[in-house]
């Protein structure tokens, strides 16, 4: 079974619509300078708060704690598509979540967030809360 990964959530959402690849790369480098702990293995340990800021405490079993605790691939890992190919734009992420997305093109930007929320609810055994309702036009 191939293990494929998707981008860190915030970068993932913005990268779906942003097309100025050169500008993204330079912005990413400036934005991440000093914010990355290359040895960190989770979002919480890899991405450091800016100087003079501290990460707020969150409840042990909260969605925020779940997201902060997501396992990451080693620093510098590349983003792969569902089929194993490398994503064309490799300069729009600062970390890669270690999560299998299968071998079919079933997960896009918003789908990744929906999946993370569903996985969190499942891990908390909140099965009755795992549902997502679109509006009258079928959109969330």
Image: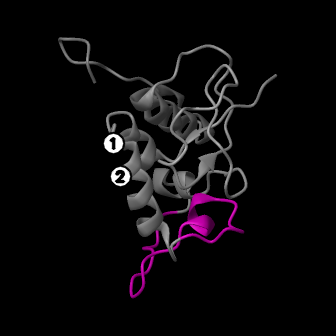
Q: Residue furthest front?
A: 22
Q: Secondary structure at mark 2?
A: helix
Q: Is residue 95 left or right of residue 31?
A: right
Residue 110 image position (x, y, % from top left): 39, 30
Q: Which mark is residue 125?
A: none
Please say whether residue 111 is one of the residues in the magenta stretch: no
Residue depicted at 43% across the width and 47% down the height: 11
Q: Position of residue 85 (x, y in %)?
A: 67, 25
Q: Given the current orientation, which residue lies at the most extreme right position?
A: 1
- Name the residue located 42 percent from the left edge and 23 percent from the top edge: 131
Considering depth in this image, is 57 or 108 the residue closer to the camera? 108
Instruction: Read off the magenta span.
Output: 36-59
**From what the image shows, is residue 2 above or below residue 125?**
above
Residue plotted at (68% across, 51% down): 71
Q: Is residue 28 left or right of residue 123?
A: left
Give the residue at mark 2. 23
Q: Are marks 1 and 2 in contact (CB under 8 Å)?
A: yes
Vertical comparison of 107 with 51: above or below: above
């Amino acid at each position: 079974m191939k293990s494929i990964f998707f981008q860190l959530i915030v970068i993932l959402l913005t990268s779906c619509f942003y097309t100025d690849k050169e500008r993204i790369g330079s912005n990413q480098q400036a934005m991440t300078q000093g914010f990355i702990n290359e040895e960190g293995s989770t979002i919480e340990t890899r991405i450091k708060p800016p100087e003079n800021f501290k990460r707020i405490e969150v409840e042990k079993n909260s969605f925020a704690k779940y997201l902060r605790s997501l396992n990451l691939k080693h620093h510098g890992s590349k983003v792969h598509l569902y089929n194993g190919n490398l994503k064309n734009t490799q300069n729009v992420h600062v970390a890669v979540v270690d999560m299998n997305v299968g071998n079919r093109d079933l997960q896009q930007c918003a789908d990744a967030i929906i999946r993370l929320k569903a996985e969190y609810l499942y891990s908390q055994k909140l099965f009755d809360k795992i549902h997502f309702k679109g509006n009258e036009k079928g959109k969330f």
